[in-house]
Image (cartoon, rainbow, N blue to C red):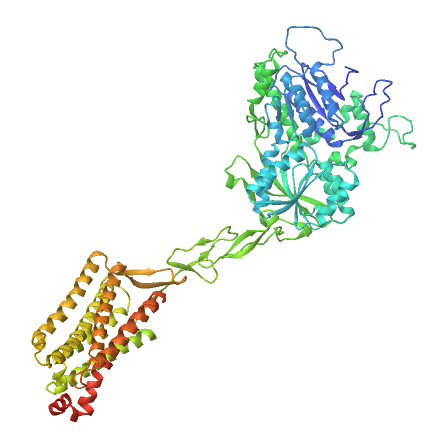
Amino acid sequence: MGEPEEPQLFKTGDIILGGIFSFHSSWKNIESTYVHSPLPLQCTSLNFRAFQFAQAMLFAIEEINNSTNLLPGIKLGYKIYDACGSTARAVRVALSLMNGNEGTATLSEKHCIGSVPAIIGLQSSSPSMAVATVIGPFHTPMVSYFATCACLSNKVRYPSFLRTIPSDYYQSRALAQMVKHFGWTWVGAIRSNNDYGNNGMATFIEIATQLGICLEYSLPFFRTDPPEQKQMIIETIKGSTSKVIIGFLSHMDMDVLIEEFAHHNLTGFQWVGTESWISDSPIAIGKGHYILDGSIGLAIRKAYVTGLREFMLDVKPLNNSGNKLFTEFWETTFGCIFSNMKQTGEHLEQCTGYEDLTGIKNSFHDMSLMSIFNNVYKGVYAVAHTLHSILGCEERCSNTIASHPQAILQHLRNIKFKTKEGEEIYFNENGDPAAKYDIINWQAKKDGSVEFVTIGLYDASLPEDKQLHIDNLTLTWANNSKQVPISVCSGTCALGTRKVLQKGKPVCCYDCIPCAEGEVSNTTDSITCVQCHPEFWSNERRDGCEKKETEFLSFTEIMGSILTVSSLLGACLKATVAFIFFRHRNTPIVKANNSELSFLLLFSLTLCFLCSLTFIGRPSDWSCMLRHTAFGITFVLCISCVLGKTLAVLMAFKSTLPGSNRMKFFGPRRQKIVVLTFTSIQVVICIVWVTANPPYPFKNLRHFKDKIILECALGSPIGFWAVLGYIGLLALLCFILAILARKLPDNFNEAKFITFSMLIFCAVWMTFIPAYVSSPGKFSVAVEIFAILASSFGLLFCIFIPKCYLILLKPERNTKKNMMSKKS
C-alpha cells in the first residue's frame, strides 16, 4: 500500500514489457519522524552504465517493432523502473509491474495475472534474489542480464528466474582451473560481502580444494565498510606470503578497494578477477589502476550488436518525451540545467538540448561492456520469441495474451533461437545459458592506459581437460613481468622425496623428506614413497629401483681364492702322504698301523678337502644337494676309518695278553665292515634328506638390505642337523676310544695322535655351530668350508705327519727289530 510508483521510462504498446535498472547507484538517507508518512526514496548519483543497459532494452524493442518476421502486427511497449541500488525499492517496483498500479482491487475467481508478461533485470544478485522470491509464486518470468550468483539456479526457491549470463558456478570452476593451470597453490582471496561474493567464493574454495589449491586468507569486503575493515585487509595482505589474490568482487566494491590500496602503494601482487570488474573500463582508468596491471580473469564473451552503438549515442529522440531521466542525464553530462535556478550555490549554464554529445568523453561513450548490452538484447529477444510462439504468429499475431503466466514461463524455458549475429540462445534446466568466458589480461600501454587483451577461452560445454585454453605467450604479469609469478606455500618436492605436512598448516604447506632406504618416488610432489620389489633396491637419489647386487662365495674373490688354494693344498698334501706311504708300504710303521685303513683314510681326507670346493660358486640345485651330502658322507667315511684304526689298536693290544684271541675277530675284513656300516648309515640319512626335502638354491633377502645373498637353503633342517649330529657322535666315540688307548706302547700306538686329532675335530665343529648360525650370507659358507679344512688338516697333521717324520727323517726307528725291542 502507498503511493503508486511511476516508471522512469514508459511507452504504450499492445504488450508491455517490464524492466528494472539501477539508474542511480545510491539514495539520500532521510531520518523518519514517525509523524508523517515517509517520503519517496530520493535517488542520487546517476549511473551511466544502467542508462546504457536500458538503452539496449529500448533498442531491442524498437528493432522487434520494426520487424516483419517477429511479432508481426504487435507493438511492444515498456515500463522501466529505477531500483536505485536498493533491494527494498527493487521489490517495490517489481510489485508495481505485477499489479499494474491499480488503485482498487476486486474479488475474482480468476488467477492473478500481472500487467507485464516478463521483467528484464536486475543487475546484481542480491536484489535479484529478493525480487525473484516475490514474483516466483505468480510465475512471472524474470530475465537477468548480469546476476551471476549460482544460488539463483535453484528452481525450487526461484522458479521463474532466468538469465542470459552464465552462473558463477561455472565461473568459480573456471577460476580454480585457471589458478591450477599456472601452478598457484597458495593464494589469498577478497570477496564482496554479499550473495555474489560469498556464494561464488564458497564454490571456488570447494573446487580449489579438490585441485590441491589452498587459501591463505579469504576476506569479506563491502564498499560501505568502515576504515578499520579496510585497514585489516591491507595488513593481512602485507603479512601474507601468497603472491596471488583472487578478487571475487563487484565492480563497485573493487573501485573503492583499489583506491585504498593505491593510498598504501600495495603493488606486486598478481590479481585474478571475475567478470564483474576484469573488463571494467572505469576501474582501468581510475585512480590506482596500476595496482591491477597484469591482472588476469574471466570476462563475458565479446559480442557485437549491429546498430546498438549508434542508437545509444543518439539519445536526442528521448528529449521529445520530456521525461525527467533524460533531463537529468543531459544535465549531468554537460554540467548545465534546463532552467535558470541555481543548484548547490552555483549558477550553471542553461541546457539547449542540442549540445554535441560526441564531443564529451565519459563512461557513457565506453562500449567495452557491449557483451553485457548483448545480454540485455538477448533477454528481450527471448521474451519476444516466446510471445511469438504463444500467440501463434504467422502473418499476423493476436494482440492479447490468453495464456497463463506459467505457460509463458514454460515456453521461455524451452525457447531456442539465433540472433541476427548468428549466436544460438537457449536455457538449460536451471534457466542458465551456455557457460563461455573470454580470459582477459590487463596489459599496460606506453601511454599508461590499459588494454584488455583476450588471451584464452573457457568453454564449460567441452570435456573437462579441454575446457580451458590459454595462450601463455601473450601474457603480461604483475609489475609488467613476462615470467609467471610463483605463489606456493612450499616448493616442489623433487624426485626421491615425499611430502610431509607441516603441523597446524593447510595441506599446501609441507616439508620434503627423502624417501627411506628401499623406497622411491619417481614423480614430483609425491605424497608417499613406493617400496621397491624385494629383489630391487633404491638408488642414491631415491628416484628409481635398481637390481640388487647378487652375492655368493665365488672362486674369483679373495676369500674364495684362498679357500680354493687351501683345499687344493690339502689335497696335494694328502697325495704326498699317500705317495710316501705307498713307497714305504712294506715298512713296519706302515704295516703296523693297518695300511689298508690308512690308505682309505687318506682317500677320504682327500675327498674332504675336495668336497669343500662344492661350497664355492653360484648355488644350483645339484651343487646344493652335492655339497651337503658329499660333506656328510666323506667325513663319516673319514671318521669311520679313524674309528676302525682306534679299534684295531685296542684289539691289537688286547690280543697280546695271554689267552686273548680278539684280534682274529677284528681282522682287516671286520675293520672294512665297520667302516662300511658306519658310512652306510650316513648314506641312508642323506638319501632320506635329499628325497624328502632336499637343499635348494635360495635368495636370502634378509641379512643385507641392498644385496641378494645366493645360498643353499637346508630344505629340511632336521636332515642337516642329523648329518652333523651323526658325524659328531662318531667323532665323540672315536675320541673316547682314543683316550682309552692313549697309554699303549709307542711304536704300536697312534691313539694319542688320534686323541689330539679328535680333540681338534670336536673343538672345530663345536665352535662351528654358533659361528655358522650367526654369520650372514656368504660368510656362513666360508665358516663351513673353514671348519671342513681345519678338521681335515687336523686329522692329516695329527695322524700322518708323525709317521712321515719317522719314515723320512728317522728311518732307523722304522725297523722290525726296533719295534720288537720296544715292545719287550
Q: Quadrant of residue 144?
A: top right
490 versus 254 height, above or below: below
Q: Quadrant of the C terminus?
A: bottom left
Residue for point 25% across, 64% down: 624
Question: Residue 24: image x %, image y %?
Answer: 77, 29
Q: Quadrant of residue 55?
A: top right
Residue for point 68% across, 14% down: 115
Residue 23 versus residue 663: which sits nearer the camera?
663
Q: Quadrant of the N terminus?
A: top right
Q: Is residue 84 left or right of residue 300?
A: right
Total residue callouts: 0
59 versus 360 height, above or below: above
Q: Is residue 205 left or right of residue 743?
A: right
Residue for point 19% across, 62% down: 685
Asked if residue 409 can be seen in this view, the reply is yes
Q: Is residue 800 left or right of residue 311?
A: left
354 versus 759 height, above or below: above
Residue 209 versus residue 629: which sits nearer the camera?
629
Residue 288 versus residue 430: which sits nearer the camera?
430
Asked if residue 306 can be seen in this view, the reply is no
Question: Residue 720: image x %, image y %?
Answer: 25, 62
Question: Residue 580: image x %, image y %?
Answer: 16, 85
Q: Is residue 781 left or right of residue 274?
A: left
Q: Quadrant of residue 436?
A: top right
Question: Residue 613: image x %, image y %?
Answer: 25, 72
Q: Residue furthest bottom?
A: 812
